[in-house]
Amino acid sequence: MDSNYTKAGYLTEPFKIFHLRDEHKLNIDFHYHDFHKILIHLHGNVSYCIEGRSYELKEHDIVLVNAGEVHKPILNDDSIYERIIIYVSQQLIDDYVSKGYDLACCFKQAYANQSHVLRLAAAKGSRLADTIKGLDSTLRETNEYANELYQKLLFLEFLIQLNRITLHGGIEYINTFSSNKKIVEILDFLNKDLTNRISIDELADKFYMSRYHLMHTFKEETGCTIGSYITTKRLLLARDMIRDGSSVSAACDACGFGSYSSFIRAYRKQFHSTPTNT
């Protein structure tokens, strides 16, 4: 039986920074996070797959992955894979929103440009690059005075600079290196209306594909079946609704689940907790 995507990583703080270096080829499955993710690619022959789109990364590329987006890296050879990863909570983003700015603007601009990868026109020697180096140094200088506070200040500076560059046109939005256009269209269609109860046959007819070809290609491109993809996305939406104050039954109905009992079972399986403990 096919299972839903795996939730990876955890975040109990407003943000968390890692510097990772793998000298051996990894095989990482498709997964998602409860939080936003920023990846700064430092080294390696890597393609990054996000929601049916695949990007070939270059040094200093910045990858933006929204909470709940299914993704995985593909290591194309045995070269060292090195990157800085930042986990960002939605609460931190919400804490720094005003009429004059929104630190999630870089994510929203990337989405509007149908991309997840930002490539700076002048990455080396830029102010943003210096800030990234400073952030990286805080991972080693843990005994320095007020290091935790300094790291937070640098991270906020990083987000501000990244958003300024985004708004002022100092970056290039990278198009997909390779993707199945039909599957990308299907994913976009499904995500725009997760509550729509559509059968696989209806989906195949809508996109002019045979049932078999649709199911085979979808799993090949996303690592999961159509049913599991929809269930995972609906559960994430339901959990967000419950966290925002909706009742469990209202979230169940709004997210297209056929019965309350099946929703509860799926929720427990996905999140290892009940909706009332969300």
Image (spheres, rainbow, N blue to C red):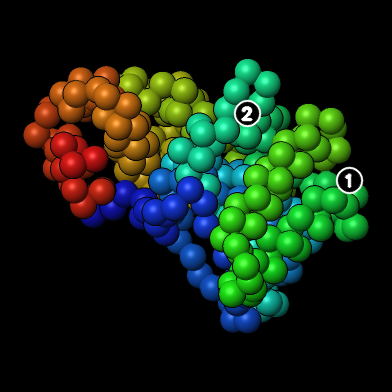
Disc 2 packing (10 Å; few <14; some 14–19; many ≥20): some
Above or below 129: residue 259: above
Q: Amino acid at mark 1?
A: Ala
Residue at 80% from the left image edge and 50% from the top image edge: 128
Percent position of residue 5, x then y: 36, 51
Question: Who is closer to the viewer here, 199 or 5?
Answer: 5
Name the residue that disc number 2 marks.
Answer: 102
Question: Who is closer to the viewer here, 31 or 241?
Answer: 241
Q: Amino acid at mark 2?
A: Asp
Name the image quarter holding the C terminus. top left
Query: Secondary structure under badge 2?
Result: loop
Q: Earlier in the sequence, mark 1 or mark 2?
A: 2
Question: Who is closer to the viewer here, 198 or 164?
Answer: 164
Percent position of residue 19, x then y: 62, 68
Quick one: which residue is furthest to the front in this view? 145
Residue 11's disc number: none
Question: Who is closer to the viewer here, 18 or 75?
Answer: 18
Query: Secondary structure under badge 1?
Result: loop
Relative to 247, 30 lies left or right:
right
Name the residue that disc number 1 marks.
Answer: 121
Name the image quarter holding the N terminus. bottom left
Disc 1 packing (10 Å; few <14; some 14–19; many ≥20): few
Above or below 242: residue 157: below
Percent position of residue 159, x then y: 68, 43
Percent position of residue 233, x then y: 37, 36
Above or below 181: residue 16: below
